[in-house]
Image: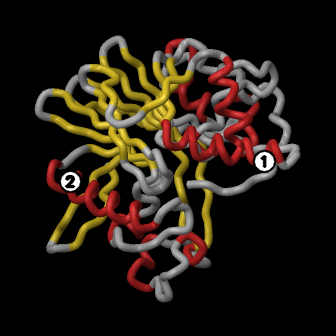
């Protein structure tokens, strides 16, 4: 998902666990959830949740009656903003880094709750380069990468597409060039970026696969361990509404036609193989399965 937001100064100390808890307030309850796929551990980490008018998310839907159970009072739909930590032996992969301190994100707090320090993460993979998936890359005070020991996998098609946009903004003299400039380019300067072009084996049980449409280079991660399968989805599906009806157009996709084909094919595959799915924006903590009952498909959280 992508939404333009003004850049605000980071709150002092917000990205420095273990002091995060006191600054976020004693009433905050972590939504972190751990599960396993065979011998591989997957942990859902919730950066934040926000609600949006359903008609803004799905502009071509005239009647939301059939989807009313997924809406809040006032006709809004809540989006989760989750990252996923996947441990396969010595590989500790973080998929996406949330929306960051400008939105009072809690990813680093969630990591601390999971018992993981940023320095222990060996790999970071971005499903795509929208700002709500790259927000905790760089410490706002020091300007240094937060996951400084990790190799950062960046989809090449997104790198090219958003890099060109940032360059155009720079040439136009715009003072702010967006999250690509703030969150992604410093990783390249630090020598931490590896571009993904096609499938990529990350570890014995983890493989990155192209799932384009939401963005040019959108990428998901297949998890395989023994006879069990899982997938970190990214933004192929946004809410339970398009989980039920993958034909719906949403406002966030780069190419609606490509996104539709990807969504239709991937959800069908996930229904058939029963994969446990980590989904960025589906209800917190974002873990569940796509199922079909009596000919109707839906998202079933776990």
Assess disc 2: are there few (<14), some (14-19) or many (≥20) residues with their C-alpha within 10 Å of its C-alpha. Answer: few
Residue 269's disc is 2
Residue 230 picture location, percent across and down: 26, 39
Q: Taking 94 as reference, is 177 left or right?
A: right
Assess disc 1: are there few (<14), some (14-19) or many (≥20) residues with their C-alpha within 10 Å of its C-alpha. Answer: some
Give above or below for 254 relative to 144.
Answer: below
Q: Within the image, what quadrant is residue 133 found in?
A: top right
Viewer-nearest of labels 2 and 1? 1
Q: Within the image, what quadrant is residue 99 found in?
A: top right
In the rendered view of the protein, which quadrant contains the N terminus? bottom right
Closer to the camera, 143 or 161? 161
Which structural element holds mark 2?
helix
Query: Can you name the residue that lies furthest to the left here?
Result: 227
Residue 107 picture location, percent across and down: 59, 34
Residue 182's disc is none
Disc 1: which residue: 169
Q: How many marks?
A: 2
Q: Residue at x 45, y 62 (%)?
A: 239
Residue 213 visible within the image: yes
Q: Residue at x 23, y 52 (%)?
A: 270
Q: Residue at x 49, y 36 (%)?
A: 156
Q: Earlier in the sequence, mark 2 or mark 1?
A: 1
Residue 285 visible within the image: no
Give above or below for 138 relative to 8.
Answer: above
Residue 254 picture location, percent across and down: 52, 59
Q: Residue at x 55, y 37 (%)?
A: 30
Which structural element holds mark 1?
helix
């Amino acid at each position: 998902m992508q939404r333009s937001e003004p850049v605000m100064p980071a709150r002092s100390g917000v990205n420095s666990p273990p002091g995060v808890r006191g600054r976020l307030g004693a009433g905050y309850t972590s939504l972190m959830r751990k599960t396993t796929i065979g011998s591989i551990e997957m942990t859902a980490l919730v950066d934040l949740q926000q609600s949006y008018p359903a008609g803004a998310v799905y502009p071509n839907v005239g009647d939301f009656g059939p989807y009313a159970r997924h809406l809040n009072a006032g006709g809004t739909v809540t989006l989760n903003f989750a990252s996923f930590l996947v441990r396969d032996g010595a590989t500790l992969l973080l998929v996406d880094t949330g929306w960051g301190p400008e939105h009072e994100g809690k990813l680093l707090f969630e990591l601390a709750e999971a018992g993981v320090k940023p320095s222990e993460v060996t790999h970071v993979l971005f499903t795509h380069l929208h700002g709500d998936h790259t927000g905790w890359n760089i410490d706002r005070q020091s300007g240094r990468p937060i996951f400084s020991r990790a190799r950062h996998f960046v989809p090449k098609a997104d790198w090219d597409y958003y890099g060109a946009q940032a360059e155009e903004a720079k040439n136009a003299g715009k003072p702010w060039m967006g999250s690509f400039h703030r969150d992604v380019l410093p990783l390249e300067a630090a020598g931490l970026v590896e571009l993904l072009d096609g499938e990529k084996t990350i570890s014995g049980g983890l493989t990155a696969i192209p799932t384009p449409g939401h963005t040019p280079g959108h990428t998901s991660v297949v998890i395989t361990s023994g006879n069990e399968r899982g997938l970190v989805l990214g933004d192929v599906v946004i809410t339970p509404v398009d989980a039920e009806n993958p034909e719906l157009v949403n406002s966030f996709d780069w190419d609606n036609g490509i996104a539709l084909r990807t969504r239709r094919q991937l959800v069908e595959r996930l229904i058939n193989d029963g994969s446990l799915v980590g989904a960025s924006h589906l209800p917190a903590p974002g873990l569940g399965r796509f199922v079909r009952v009596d000919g109707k498909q839906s998202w079933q959280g776990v």
